[in-house]
Image (tube, helix red, strand yellow):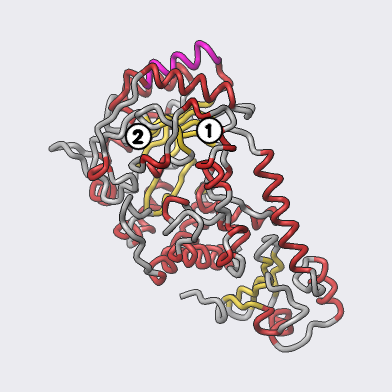
């Protein structure tokens, strides 16, 4: 298991000042990578440099490079770096545009996925949003959205169970607002796929298809409620039809424990299907279920996903979630959040027509408020609760070697919104370690 102090070394703890408390050495055998946890800047070190760093004071040439990159600092250097990072985060959040609307058109589903983070089997209220509330939500969102191309996602449950209203909304948006609004339907691919295909082709709508890999995996992790429903055949059939028609599409693959044992097979499947837009979703705790700490499993998963990421990249496939986690390393920037909810840039509308910042809290009445609460949603307490829960504001995160790139993980999957999930922390340490090892 990747451990801080053994595989990832705090240079301040090992050698004291003038090393920054944000300077960490990721050891990869004889070579290593120096990473500044707050700025995400990295320096790759060969065998000789690694030996020099680990065996005594740095020489004058090394010291100049390390000072320039803030790995070596003056007495107040770390405070200035942290203050600057906090100021950048604050400025960024103040400038964030409202970009995204998630319409949860129904909380019912025709599948019973083993990992359903909404836990619809227990928490579904069998609700479907009415068309009037859909139009009201779209108009509300597009009135306050400040992005050049605002995005609308039709979500569930399974949104195709409310297909009539989804289709009417797509037609309404195109007729009133034109082509500059991006729309996407997230579906399991088992209902009215021919109608969906035709509407998407006619109105330029994207589709995200949930599929967890080959049939032997998808049909176990995503079983249907009805007898004889072959979920895999329906989902892969829709993927192929979308690809052949050059309709914008993506595959969403969740990795529960069962799938983690077959990640190589899953990667082979997506490579063979030539899926160009792929997202791996981590298994989240279900609503009302406490997180059980299992760092060894999440450590191993981080290593496996890093390997999968590199294999997919070799075939020209960028797995978007891993890329999102490590993007800060390429730009040496601080990642505020892993999703739009943490930036306060999205609005979610539930089947009751109420708004909230995150679709994960569908079963929690206290995470929703009336649409009439105001046009400046980011000033509302719910949105502020999410944006304030950045890793830069969590004390236990500031000593983590990957604080600048992880984004803190899913807010829904934390013990509380303002405290990190230790499983995810271990996952990120392992993921980043193995990704930079194979650069």
Please tell me which residue is depicted at 46% across the width and 14% down the height of the picture: 172
Residue 307 drawn in magenta? no
Please tell me which residue is depicted at 41% across the width and 65% down the height of the picture: 298
Q: Position of residue 137 (x, y in %)?
A: 46, 23
Q: Which mark is residue 100?
A: 1
Q: Nearer the viewer, residue 214 or 384?
A: 384
Q: Position of residue 205 (x, y in %)?
A: 46, 24
For mark 2, what is the residue?
156
Q: Is residue 334 above or below residue 422?
A: above
Q: Would residue 219 be found to the left or right of residue 438 on screen?
A: left
Quadrant assignment for the N terminus: bottom left
Q: Secondary structure at mark 2?
A: loop
- Kindly give the residue lying farthest to the left in the view shown: 227
Q: Nearer the viewer, residue 49 or 353?
A: 353
Q: Which mark is residue 393?
A: none
- Kindly give the residue lying farthest to the top in the view shown: 175
Dot 2 and dot 1 residues touching (CB under 8 Å): no
Does residue 206 appear anywhere in the picture?
no
Tell me where the magenta segment starts and ends, as one range. Answer: 166-177
Q: Position of residue 109 (x, y in %)?
A: 26, 35
Mark count: 2
Query: Which quadrant of the structure image shows residue 294?
Result: bottom left
Q: Position of residue 258 (x, y in %)?
A: 29, 59
Give the dominant element type of the magenta stretch: helix, strand or loop: helix
């Amino acid at each position: 298991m990747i451990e801080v102090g053994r595989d990832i070394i705090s240079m301040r703890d090992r050698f004291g000042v003038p090393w920054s408390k944000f300077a960490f050495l990721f050891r990869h055998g004889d070579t290593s990578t120096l990473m500044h946890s707050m700025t995400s800047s990295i320096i790759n070190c060969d065998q000789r440099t690694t030996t020099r760093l680990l065996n005594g004071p740095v020489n004058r040439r090394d010291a100049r490079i390390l000072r320039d990159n803030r790995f070596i600092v003056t007495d107040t250097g770390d405070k200035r770096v942290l203050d600057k990072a906090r100021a950048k985060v604050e400025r960024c959040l103040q400038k964030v545009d409202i970009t995204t609307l998630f319409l949860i058109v129904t909380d019912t589903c025709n599948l019973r996925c083993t990992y359903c983070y909404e836990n619809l089997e227990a928490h579904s209220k069998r609700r479907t949003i009415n068309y009037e509330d859909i139009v009201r939500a779209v108009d509300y969102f597009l009135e306050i959205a400040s992005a050049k191309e605002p995005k609308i996602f039709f979500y569930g449950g399974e949104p195709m169970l409310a297909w009539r209203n989804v289709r009417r909304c797509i037609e309404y948006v195109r007729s009133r607002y034109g082509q500059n609004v991006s729309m996407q339907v997230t579906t399991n691919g088992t209902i009215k796929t021919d109608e969906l295909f035709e509407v998407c082709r006619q109105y330029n709508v994207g589709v995200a298809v949930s599929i967890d890999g080959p049939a032997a995996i998808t049909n176990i992790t995503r079983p249907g409620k009805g007898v004889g429903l072959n979920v895999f055949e329906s989902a892969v059939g829709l993927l192929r039809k979308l690809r052949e028609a050059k309709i914008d599409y993506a595959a969403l693959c969740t990795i529960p424990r069962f799938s983690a044992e077959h990640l190589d097979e899953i990667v082979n499947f997506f490579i063979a299907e030539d899926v160009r837009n792929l997202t791996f979703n981590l298994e989240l705790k279900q609503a009302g279920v406490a997180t059980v700490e299992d760092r060894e499993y999440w450590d191993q998963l981080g290593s496996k996903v890093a390997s999968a990421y590199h294999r997919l990249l070799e075939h020209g496939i960028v797995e978007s979630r891993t890329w999102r986690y490590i993007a800060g390393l390429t730009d040496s920037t601080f990642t505020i959040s892993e999703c739009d909810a943490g930036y306060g840039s999205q609005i979610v509308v539930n089947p009751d027509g109420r708004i909230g910042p995150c679709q994960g809290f569908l079963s929690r009445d206290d995470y929703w408020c009336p649409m009439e609460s105001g046009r400046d949603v980011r000033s509302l307490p719910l949105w502020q609760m999410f944006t304030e829960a950045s890793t830069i504001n969590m004390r236990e995160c500031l000593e983590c070697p990957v604080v600048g790139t992880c984004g803190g993980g899913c807010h829904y999957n934390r013990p509380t919104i303002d405290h990190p999930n230790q499983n995810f922390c271990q996952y990120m340490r392992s993921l980043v370690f193995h990704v930079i090892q194979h650069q």
